[in-house]
Image: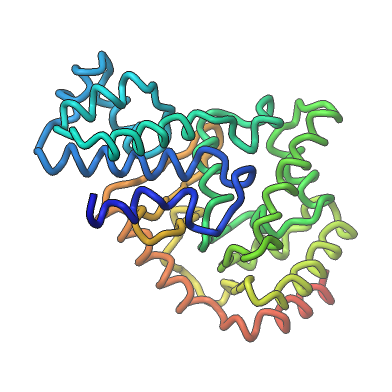
Amino acid sequence: MGSDEAFLTTPSDSGVLDDQSAGPMLARLVLGARLRGLREELAIAREAAGYVIRASRSKISRMEAGRHGFKLRDVADLLTLYGVTDEAERATLLALAEEANSPAWWQHFNDVVPPWTQAYLGAEQAASLIRSFEVQRVPPLLQTPDYARASIRLAHAGSCGEELDRRVMLRMTRQRILRRRPAAQLWAVIDEAALRRPVGGIRTMRAQLRHLIEICRLPQVTVQVMPFLAGGHAAEAGPVTILRLPGGRLPDMVYLEQRVTALYPDKPNEIECYWDVMNRLVVEAESPDETPTILHRILQET
């Protein structure tokens, strides 16, 4: 298999996550990327690939992006279409398809995980680097339980107490990536508005600010503040999250969460555009070295 051999071993050999944490997401992404590469090498249109497995062009697109499960028969038919006859490679890819269909780590919270966020939750736990910009809220990975509860209650006003508890637990579970070995690297830029908006009341907000001051001390966490005085900035369209996955062979994932859906721009030029936005933000924001001082000042004024 040549250079593809290292590519195909990413899920089990990366050393970044155990199976429970990674779930099927890495397998989906690796298999999807490999199928896309095979198709593009032969210049086969998505419509033609979809016809072979009795599916639409959009399903092929979702499969290649790792946002759809895989039927073994479909993978086998695609491999035949793409001329993959080597039995070892076929066996490896079919094994990835089986792994891709295993239960995800968030299945326990399935009742509070909408379909449009499932791919992100899987990739987030597999990420080696997370870059984010937030405008209205402290990033979920940096929230305290009380702040998270208040924020979730605003977004899900009709939720009962038990459902709120589960949503909070889901958010707290996501934060384990900052404490695992090795930890994911998180680099967040937070608009000053999010730090001055007392979500959950003054007491909750003060506790949240103190938490941010403490967590900024972790070597795997970098936080920058985008001050009001900076004026306009590169991400005025709203929050952005970019995930970098382990292994160096998978494309970065761009995630744009909206009220009742999310967008996953995945074309190379789109991903590059959002990286440009993120890189401009870190230049426009205050230095990370200034973050504790800024947070202390806001805490005193809250």
Q: How is the image coloured?
A: rainbow
Q: Residue at x 14, y 23 (%)?
A: 48
The outermost residue toward the top is 54
Can residue 271 be seen by looking at this rendering?
yes
Task: Identify whether 165 is placed above or below 76.
Answer: below
Tell me where residue 66 appears, x and y as whole percent.
40, 38
Q: Quadrant of residue 209?
A: bottom right
Determine the image quadrant of residue 95. Answer: top left
Residue at the image point whose x is 46% and y is 59% from the top: 246
In this view, the residue in front, 166 or 2, is 2
User: Residue 46: x and y, percent?
Assistant: 19, 29
Q: Position of residue 109 (x, y in %)?
A: 70, 31
* Left or right: 100 as drawn, with respect to 109: left
Left or right placement of residue 214 versus residue 3 in this view? right
> Residue at the spot x=79%, y=52% of the render?
147
**Is residue 242 among what the camera can see?**
no
Of the 4 image quadrants, the one containing the C terminus is bottom right
Q: How many marks?
A: 0
Work out which residue is located at the far left of the displayed protein and give it.
43
Foreground: 1 or 38? 1
Residue shown at 48% from the left, 74% from the top: 282
Furthest toward the front, the residue is 87
Q: Quadrant of residue 33?
A: top left
Q: Position of residue 224 (x, y in %)?
A: 59, 74
